[in-house]
Amino acid sequence: MPTFFCPVCWAESQEDSPVCPYCGADIARVLGSKSYSERLAEALAHPEPTTPLRVAHVLGLRKEVAAVPALAARAH
């Protein structure tokens, strides 16, 4: 069973939860208001440790130039 995370605060939430129980974000509205590229760039801050690596790879494959600042900000 997959784990779902709030796209605002990254708290774990139920798959069918319309509102984050921790921060109160309207999950559908947040996801619907951003492009796929924007959501990918935000997922660089995901708490699950392999997700940012996969996201960085996908951003590179897509040649998402707009994501370069977000990638650079997370470089160690």
Image: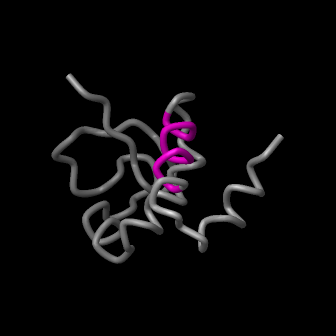
Residue 23, above or below 64 = above
Position in image of residue 1 (x %, y %)? 20, 22
How many discs appear? 0
Going 60% across and 74% down the picture, which residue do you hit? Answer: 66
Front residue of this view, candidates 65 and 6: 65
Going 67% across and 65% down the picture, which residue do you hit? Answer: 68
Q: How is the image coloured?
A: one colour
Q: Which quarter of the rendered picture does the C terminus lie within? A: top right
Quarter location, residue 70 = bottom right
Position in image of residue 45 (x %, y %)? 60, 47
Going 45% across and 61% down the picture, which residue do you hit? Answer: 62
Residue reaching furthest to the right? 76
Q: Main secondary structure of the magenta part?
A: helix
Position in image of residue 42 (x %, y %)? 53, 58
Front residue of this view, candidates 7 and 54: 54
Tell me, yes or no, whether the highlighted magenta stretch contains residue 67. Answer: no
Q: In the picture provided, is 6 more to the left or to the right than 70?
A: left
Q: In the picture provided, is 2 more to the left or to the right than 73?
A: left
Going 47% across and 68% down the picture, which residue do you hit? Answer: 38
Tell me, yes or no, whether the highlighted magenta stretch contains residue 53. Answer: yes
Residue reaching furthest to the bottom? 33
Q: In the picture provided, is 5 more to the left or to the right than 32?
A: right
Residue extent of the magenta highlight: 51-59
Position in image of residue 24 (x %, y %)? 39, 59
Residue reaching furthest to the top? 1
Residue 76, above or below 73 = above
